[in-house]
Amino acid sequence: MYAAVTLLGVSLSIFVILRILPGDPLVAILGVEGHARMTPADRVRIMADLGLSDPLPVQYVRWLGDIAAGRLGKSFFRGDTVAELITHRGPISAEIGVLALFVSWIVGLPVGILSAFKPNSVPDGLARMLSILFIAIPGFWLGMLIVLALLFWFGYKSPFIIVHVWEDPWTNFQMVVGPGVVLGLAQGAYIARMSRSCLLEVISEDFVRTARAKGLREGLVVMRHALPNALLPVITISGVLLGFVLGGSVAVEQAFGVPGLGRALVIAVIERDIIVVQNLVLLYAVIFVVVNVLVDLSYAWLDPRIRYS
Amino acid sequence: MRAVLWEIVRFARRNRLAAAGGLVGFAIILVALTAPWLAPRDPLKADFRRMNKPPDAQSLLGTDQVGRDTLSRVIYGARTSLFVAFSAVILGTTVGSLWGVACGYLRGRFDLYSQRIMEILQSFPDLILAMAISMAIGTGLPAVIFAIAITRIPFGGRVIRSVALSVREMPYVEAGRASGASALRIMALHVLPQCVAPYLVLATTHLGVAIVIEAALGFLGVGVPPPTPTWGNMLADSITALVPPWWLAFFPGLAITITVLAFNLFGDGIRDTLDPRLSPAFLRLMTGGRRA
């Protein structure tokens, strides 16, 4: 319920940011020179064509109606519709996101567990150093270096024309693996950190002492008793980290030259293609909010003490 | 003065890594401040006789496509990047914190609506919100600072609000109320001082994030406009080449990484010292995981 209100607020703030702040949208689209070169009649015609001459509240409501009806409008400069953009490029970005999530858990959780097993040991110190390092390295820079190294030493360049997974899985994999792993490692660092500190917190609790006292093996104590109780915050942070993935993927896609949705957004922002920016930003925010609602709902499923009325 | 020094020595002994981070961070700030004296060349001056030169004795970190000295540009880049990051974090965290104090102390409907607004702000991935805002208000230094600052507001708001919520129940605040002090007076004189420690923790932990967002904006071509040297702009310049020279891609990114690493380590240490309660709970709070 709150999520629906939040989303409405999100759409309203996107609209406010993109329509009210810049003043004349035509100047934004055409640039000052282009705007000055047009006759007033042209300006009025284009404004009417774009539906930009109506009062703002009318425009806002019409935008919401359009979205509800699935009409996402089209690019001012390129003629492809936003819906095409999403169906064509979206899957690539979605694959990158899912891959990043997968990598982050498959790397982060074992490292966190290993760290918590023997806190302040050498492997723990190493793991913590690495996670601090990976949090600090900007993903897009790491991506650039990887692309450069592959090009330099192997003359390899990943494919840059969109190939979907159902067309050619191998080529498609080459496109998404770089961004996915780079984004995944950065998040994996957060997950390792979080799972370590949560596990350590849980391990000092009474029921863990009891489990140890009744003679369970240490591995069983951690995996069976401690871990499930430490996972909740880790899942939360994973949901929040999706914001890093969504935002970060925009830059990382650029670094790898992957033509995903993030690239489309960047191009639209640079070209000041308001309709595209508006709808893509909304899409990113919707995904972010929906995933975090799912995370909240998963609490109730994972932790029987939590019940939502 | 001696007491302050002693305090710093104690901090350094207990948090070696944090102290190292602080030292490196301080050195980078110094570099940024003294850039005109440190940089061997003018960062904007093109030299067409020395284009795309790999690192050598004349230009230690090589030159770019129009012959500008990479080392000088990295040094000047520290200026822009740090200026943007510091301004944005101070602006965003301060606005967020003051807002948070008001929310936590006043509660009621004001708090309710404010929380919704912050939730909305947090519904955008940071970088995407910053991109949209800087696109709307035009690219330029103030626009970038403003855009990044806005993304920092909800963090300050949430954390400081929770501090204010607990402080308002303290007996001395109640005493203030009982003796007829106005809400504004209590907030300014009694609640606000309690928020200084968490404010500092927040500000230092967000410096690194702000630097990365600024670099990413520059990298995507929507940040501080060229030819101003920023680390992000330099990275963006380097990939326009068909085969980017490695030194152009490597050094600006290294500068970002070292700076972010230094500030993060320092921030972690500050957090452990000033407010150990915040550590894991802080992350959870940051995540807003407890709404529903």
Image: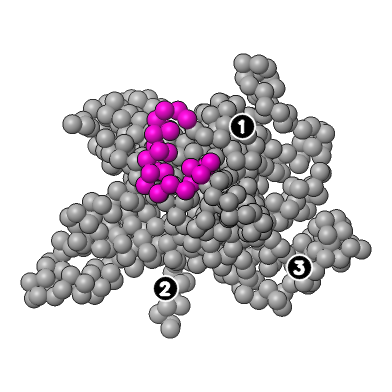
Q: CA distance from mark 1 to mark 2?
A: 62 Å
Query: Which quadrant of the figure contains the C terminus of chain B?
Result: top left
Give the quarter of the image for residue A181. Answer: top right
Q: Position of residue B40 (x, y in %)?
A: 78, 72
Q: Does the rendering let one see residue B73? A: yes
Closest to the observer, A32 or B242 = A32
The answer to whether residue B117 is left or right of residue A162 is: left
Does A55 appear in magenta?
yes
Q: CA distance from mark 3 to mark 1?
A: 39 Å
Q: Residue at x 42, y 73 (%)?
A: B7
The answer to whether residue B134 is left or right of residue A208 is: right
- What amino acid type should be assigned to the residue bearing mark 3? Leu
Q: Which span is picked out in magenta?
A: A48-71
- Label 1, secondary structure: give it: loop
Q: Chain of mark 2?
A: B
**Is the residue under label 1 in contact with that under label 3 (CB below 8 Å)?**
no
Q: Residue at x 38, y 27 (%)?
A: A223
Q: Does the rendering let one see residue B209? A: no
The answer to whether residue A288 is left or right of residue B56 is: left
Q: Position of residue A198 (x, y in %)?
A: 37, 40
- What amino acid type should be assigned to the residue bearing mark 2? Glu
Q: Which circle marks residue A80 in the picture?
A: 1
**Is the residue under label 2 in contact with that under label 3 (CB below 8 Å)?**
no
Q: Chain of mark 1?
A: A
Closest to the observer, A264 or A258 = A264
Residue corresponding to mark 2: B7
Residue corresponding to mark 3: B44
